Amino acid sequence: YILGSAEVVGLMCLKIFVYGDEDEYQKLKPYAMKLGSAFQKINFLRDYSADYHELGRLYFPGIDHSGELSVENKMRIEDEIQKEFDEALIGIKMLPKSSRFGVYV
């Protein structure tokens, strides 16, 4: 699901940010995907209760969904998100100067 949503948006933006330079695009692609994934997981985490209780949707494999999200599981997800942001920052620092600040902020 993440690839078809937030990661794709990041990849489309990246194509513009690198002015269509295919080598730069390929070099930065994994970082753009990590950034999109982290943002999407934040949305999933924010909407967890409504998605689970009202819509029956679950987006975190390997998490016990027998009730409310436990503090332990929430922290595990937050750690995963932070790791993705940390990886994405490497790529943000390599973006062309014209795009770097806007993506960083």
Image (cartoon, rainbow, N blue to C red):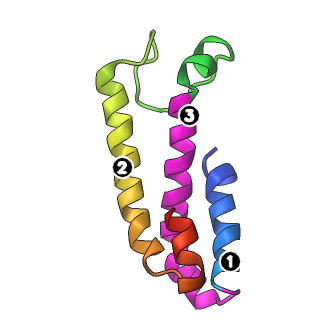
User: Where in the figure is residue 45, as x and y percent of width and height?
Assistant: 50, 31
* 2 to the left or right of 63: right
User: Could you say which disc has been placed on residue 82 in the image?
Assistant: 2
Secondary structure at numbered mark 3: helix
Point out the tag, 1 or 3, that comes first from the N-terminus.
Answer: 1
Residue receiving disc 1: 15
Q: Label 3 sits on what residue type?
A: Phe
User: Where in the figure is residue 34, as x and y percent of width and height?
Assistant: 48, 59
User: Where in the figure is residue 64, as x and y percent of width and height?
Assistant: 40, 19
Q: Label 2 sits on what residue type?
A: Gln
Residue drawn at point x = 38 percent, y = 36 percent = 77
> Pointer 2: residues within 10 angstroms few (<14), some, or many (20+)?
few
Q: Is residue 14 magenta?
A: no
Above or below for 32 versus 71: below
**Is any part of residue 96 visible from this angle?**
no
Residue receiving disc 3: 44
Residue drawn at point x = 69 percent, y = 52 percent = 4
Q: Is residue 31 magenta?
A: yes
Given residues 93 and 64, the one toward you in this image is 93
Q: Report the number of discs.
A: 3
Main secondary-structure element of the magenta-colored stretch? helix
State which quadrant residue 72 falls in.
Answer: top left
Q: Which segment did they paint magenta?
A: 19-46
Point out the tag, 1 or 2, that comes first from the N-terminus.
Answer: 1
User: Could you say which disc has been placed on residue 48 in the image?
Assistant: none
> Pointer 1: residues within 10 angstroms few (<14), some, or many (20+)?
some
